[in-house]
Image: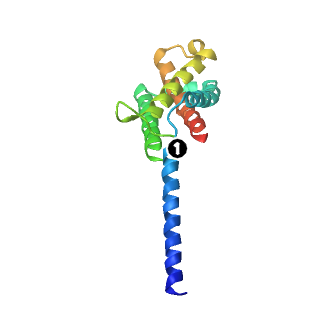
Amino acid sequence: MDRDELKRIERELHAIEETVSQISERLKERKESFKFSDFVQEVAGAVLLAFPFAANADIWELAKEISLSHALFILFLVAVALFFVIEYSNLANFKVQHVAGFLPLRLFTILTISLTVSALALVILGVYPSIIKEGEWFFKATVLITLFSVIGSFGLDAAR
């Protein structure tokens, strides 16, 4: 290979490098903001996992036996894990939008939807108030079901 051919190859490599960089920038810009369809996917994912777990007597018994502080700790761990997955991973093609400057919007929506759907699942299935009769027991059962419905909610939202 002579010097002219090496320079030509070097120029081509530089052009390819520039093209790849431009494509990478365009892909970063294509990340989507939170839309109504994302909300629907989060609800569908939460429903898919909340109802089977809400109908499970083992969940009710476990909720009856754990302490309120244990349930709150589980909820805290779920929120922290979800925060790190949303904030620091690149699992989905969505922008990380923030509420109040630091709280990822999807963390807020997924937790809110999952808690609401989990509580509604217990009510719709008649578990509360016919089997679960106390408010604290209901809250602890809701938290345990939320542990699973968060997985469905985030999973379906990230899978698109």
Relative to 144, residue 155 above or below: below
In this rendered view, identify the residue nearer to me: 126 or 58: 126
Q: Position of residue 141 (x, y in %)?
A: 52, 24
The residue lying furthest to the bottom in this view is: 2
In this rendered view, identify the residue nearer to me: 143 or 155: 155
Q: Position of residue 89 (x, y in %)?
A: 48, 47
Relative to 2, residue 118 above or below: above
Q: Position of residue 130 (x, y in %)?
A: 60, 12
Query: Which residue is depicted at the point 65% across and 28% down?
Result: 52
In this rendered view, identify the residue nearer to me: 52 or 149: 149
Query: Secondary structure under badge 1?
Result: loop
Q: Which residue is mark 1?
A: 30
Amino acid found under the numbered disc labelled 1: Arg
Numbered marks: total: 1
Quadrant of the image for the N terminus?
Answer: bottom right
| Left or right: where 156 falls relative to 20 | right
Q: Position of residue 75 (x, y in %)?
A: 45, 31
Query: Which residue is depicted at the point 44% across and 32% down?
Result: 105
